[in-house]
Amino acid sequence: MPDASRASAPQSIARAVGGLALAGAGALAWASLVEVRWYTLREVTVPVLPAGQEPLRILHLSDLHLLPNQQRKVDWVRDLASLDPHLVVDTGDNWAHLDAMPALLRALEPHLARPGAFVLGSNDYIAPVPKNPARYLLPDARRGSGSQHRELPWRELVARMTSAGWIDLTNRRDVLSVDGRRISLAGTDDAHLDRDAYPPAGGADDARTGSEPVDLHLGVTHAPYRRVLDAMHADDVDLAIAGHTHGGQLAVPFYGALVTNCDLDTSRAKGLSGWPGPRPDRPGGADSTWLHVSAGLGTSPYAPVRFACRPEATLLTLTAP
């Protein structure tokens, strides 16, 4: 008499494989059709201001990777102006197409009317090209790339932003007066392209060397490589702000990011943390610098998926401890 359990084993395996395939197809559909467009606003409080000061709101925009036809993203970014931030910080990778300038300027229009500062990312300089998505899982996704890139009109983008009054922090320092507060800033060019050169402290452009007191010292960069964060920590920035990681882009529920696309550890792939140790308000974090990394609002047009990592902008509310 045939063994019923043996006879049903191939059918059980087939059902399991079919179930996995169906689950995988469902996850891919969710990641590519729903979550990648499911924009969210994160609201984060950072107790970093001097005692007695009123809260200061910073809108952190990053990694829009905007395409000309992404009207819903344009409208969503424009609507963030209703948050009435005191300062806007843009950490780069704004666009992903040679013809995206009009859409990008429309998205940023209400924000350019406010005090702002920016740095550029690799995809502000060069347009993305088709490549194997699996390369993103490498420790350094730049390796093995032989593609020819097309330069984007980044000089015009910089000119548009600076003519509106935003401060270009590309490997330089500057100072802003915002809501009665004096803010010093230090920024770098994109470390992912090895264009970073942290501006030295104590020079003529270091606001902290002047006679007027500084209420806040910010560090701004696109890609949060360890060398840049180490330089910011040594420079005693109160808060370091970065993007680039996409929060891992494809995360594992209840675990988090698998990669950061730089040498930053995955536990800091997005959100508020500390550098080089725990958050300053946690045990062992007294000597750390506050760090905020945005998961950003976009993706490469050749890998338009997000899973367990919604596209985001962040309203940082800085407060006194």
Image (cartoon, grey):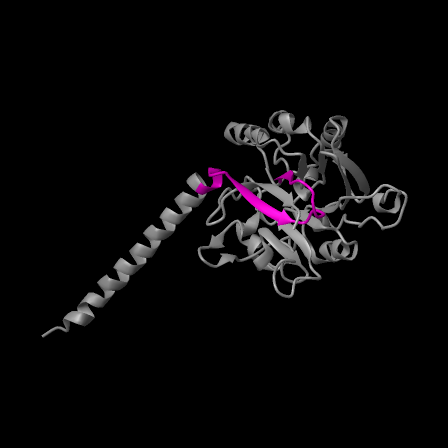
Magenta segment includes 266: no
* Quarter-of-image position of residue 10: bottom left
Looking at the image, how many numbered discs can be counted on the residues?
A: 0
Foreground of the two, 172 or 210: 210
* Quarter-of-image position of residue 265: bottom right
Residue 27 on image: x %, y %: 39, 48
Residue 193 on image: x %, y %: 72, 48
Residue 8 on image: x %, y %: 19, 66
Is residue 180 toward the left or the right of residue 147 in the image? right
Boundaries of the magenta span: 35-61
* Quarter-of-image position of residue 161: top right
Foreground of the two, 308 or 184: 184
Q: Residue furthest left?
A: 1
What is the quadrant of the N terminus in the image? bottom left
Residue 14 on image: x %, y %: 27, 60
Is residue 242 toward the left or the right of residue 258 in the image? right
Which residue lies at the image location 64% right of the left edge and 57% below the top edge? Answer: 274
Residue 276 vertical position relative to residue 63 in the rendered view, above or below: below
Q: Residue furthest front?
A: 52
Residue 153 vertical position relative to residue 227 in the rendered view, above or below: above
Residue 115 vertical position relative to residue 286 in the rendered view, above or below: above
Is residue 200 toward the left or the right of residue 138 in the image? right
Q: Is residue 279 visible?
A: yes
Which residue lies at the image location 68% right of the left edge and 29% below the top edge? Answer: 114
Which residue lies at the image location 61% right of the left edge and 33% below the top edge? Answer: 97
Which residue lies at the image location 40% right of the left edge and 44% below the top edge? Answer: 30
Foreground of the two, 139 or 80: 80
Q: Is residue 294 visible?
A: no
Foreground of the two, 207 or 15: 207
